[in-house]
Image (tube, rainbow, N blue to C red):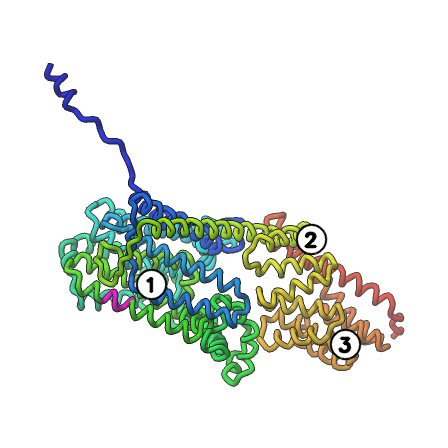
Amino acid sequence: MAKKQRKKKRKPSPSFRLSFDRILIYGVASAIFLLPLFFWPTVTEYGYGKTIAGLIAISALSVLWGLSAWQKGSWSIRIPWIAFPVLGFVFASLLSLVHATNGRVVVQSLVLLIFFFQLLLIIANVVRERRDVHLLLAALLMSAFLATLYGLLQYLGALPGAHTGAGVSNMISTMGNRNYLGGFLAYLLVPVIVLVLRPRSRWLRAISIPLIAFCFGTATLIRQTGVNVSLAVAGIVLLAGLLIFRPFEPIRRNRRWLLVFLGVLILTFLIEAPSAPWNSVVGLSNDGSSWIVRFWEKNSGNVRTWDWWIGWEMFKDHPLTGVGLGNYKLNFVPYKAAFLSTPRGEAYNFPILRAAQAHNEYVQILAELGVLGALALVSFLVVLILSLWKRLRTNPDPGARFDLLLFCCGIVAFFTHSLVSFPAHLPASSLVVVLLGGLIFSRVYGDVGILRVKLSGWSMKGSVTAILLIGLVVSVVAVRDLSANVWMKQGIEQIALGNYYGAEWSLKRSIALDFAPRQAYYHLATAQLRLGKLDEAQENLERCLTRFVDESVYLSYANLMVNTRQPEPAREAIELLLAGHPRAEIETKARYLEALVFSLEGDYSTAIDRLEKLVEDDPTFQTAYLTLGSFYQGRGMPVNARKNYDKALQLIEKKLAKAQATLEASRGAITAETYGTLRSQIEQLTEERTAVLERLAQLPDSPSP
């Protein structure tokens, strides 16, 4: 009877239900975990896939946030003070359309800026408890650990990376570049110390310690001075902040955990770190080189200052509004040539590839947005510093001050690294600073520096509907752009395999889907040149001059102009190329085309002189010998003609044998790009060999000795 009474008193267990708010937190955590790891194998660049995934994820989270407000009947939105300088940045970006080479690139870049700030707003509004802070930081740390593990396995040669083999240069992880991985780690290593000293869960602390140490060790293994300096500056700011704001209580209470953490860090550094100014004991990559040598290794400092001066030249031309957000890469080649003609540019007498970014976010903002963009940036930094200072000064909880100080150090590392890199242009790196900003301005750390806006009724419903429509439109455009990139990569591979009709169709499909097609026009022109569609190829190469401005574009355009007997536009393209100190291969071909331009104008003497000087500087360029032989043959100088034909044939036979041997030795174990390069080289050499033999047969027999 007693058992029956106990059964009656037992209440049914409540069903498990998640509120919209908890679903939103888990959604944010999932996005933070997945985005750094995401890459799409069939697109041309890892960061591009992350960008598309980020736009779709932020759209989904924004819609979910709006639906949560709809369910509640009102929408209370916390807006940090930094939103106002961000609006100023948006305004400056719109004004930069005035001088933009390509307005669609401005729009694309601006949408990315707005959406990532939207993610910051979402985090600032949905994070309500300390457990939410720890959940998001743990998600980012676990993602960083997996990305770091992947990169380390590439370093050891256990997984494929940038090339076959092993070593630092093989590390690309899920970022596509070891520098990007290093920066990503530098920004999060100090903030995630929160997971060592603040959570209640001992398991979370115990797991976080080796994960942070592993990421730290690999960050030093990458051997990037910018990463090391960013971490050092963050450490200095941490020490200064501890002395100023004195958040010592969580440190004293958790000193044992802190000692264990520091011990594991030191041990990891001794085992994993390469040689440094202070040297390591074991060092996986201890090559004995001086840290000063590595600091300026391979002219990296000179290359960066070159990029900065070119950005300065852009600013001088358009000081108020700049050359257009995202348009630095579209103006680099012509401005490079202009800069090298100045007295300052004379010191930069080495070749450099086209730079898509200025390797300094502040210089790039000045170049792309002018004074208005610089004012917006300064306003953002001032408001951010004031907001952080007030939060640290007024928060009575030493634990909260400790958290805020660690988050500030991550942001400091980001802005320090921005002096020599472009983390704001990398989705994974931007994600770190967006997360830290969102956590800083969340209600967990108070309401200082926050404005509140409350929407209800039709204003709330209209806002939710607008967000739903905008998110849908942006997601559709993003998916189309991703599809366009897949079609473009397929077209590039078809060109490499010699399927030019298939490549043309794929690339036209890519252009039709892409919101702002760029490289696809160049590859389409390449396919059309092989198909003999010269007029269409010329149109697409000319489109590249406002979409994909690269030295290879100018070279292809000049070559086409020579072949279609249009010397004036050919000369303009060649002069721009040669004025920009291109790499040796481009320079040799440009000089060759320059000689052909003289021949088109009837100045064969100058053409021959230019070719003779060219083969003197590059005695392995067989095409110049072949053309020299043709010129001498046409002028009735058979001895000189035969001499150059023989030299051309000798070089052709040697290069042809080497290319064929390389192709055979690969036995199919090469990429489509490498195969296409070898196949094109073999085709060109075979055609030149046939031409040489035909022309040698036309020469009179050599006189008997």
Q: Give the prevailing secondary structure in the magenta stretch.
A: helix
- Residue 427 occupies quadrant: bottom left
Furthest residue toward bottom: 343
Which mark is nearer the camera, 2 or 1? Answer: 1
Which mark is nearer the camera, 3 or 2? Answer: 2
Task: Determine if the magenta segment contains residue 540.
Answer: no
Task: Name the amino acid, label 1.
Answer: Ala
Task: Name the amino acid, label 3.
Answer: Ser
Residue marked by disc 3:
599
Residue marked by disc 1:
83
Disc number at residue 522? none
Disc number at residue 500? 2
Image marks 2 and 1: residues in contact by CB distance under 8 Å: no
**Residue count near mark 3 (Cα–Cα under 10 Å), binned few <14, some 14–19, many ≥20:** some
Image marks 1 and 3: residues in contact by CB distance under 8 Å: no
Magenta residue span:
384-389
Local secondary structure at mark 1: helix
Q: Earlier in the sequence, mark 3 or mark 2?
A: 2
Furthest residue toward front: 458
Q: Is residue 607 above or below residue 270?
A: below
- Residue 661 occupies quadrant: bottom right
Q: Residue at x 29, y 39 (%)?
A: 18
Q: Earlier in the sequence, mark 2 or mark 1?
A: 1
- Asked if residue 228 lies left or right of residue 393, the reply is right
Local secondary structure at mark 2: helix
Give the CA separation, mark 1 to mark 3: 61 Å
- Residue 93 occupies quadrant: bottom left
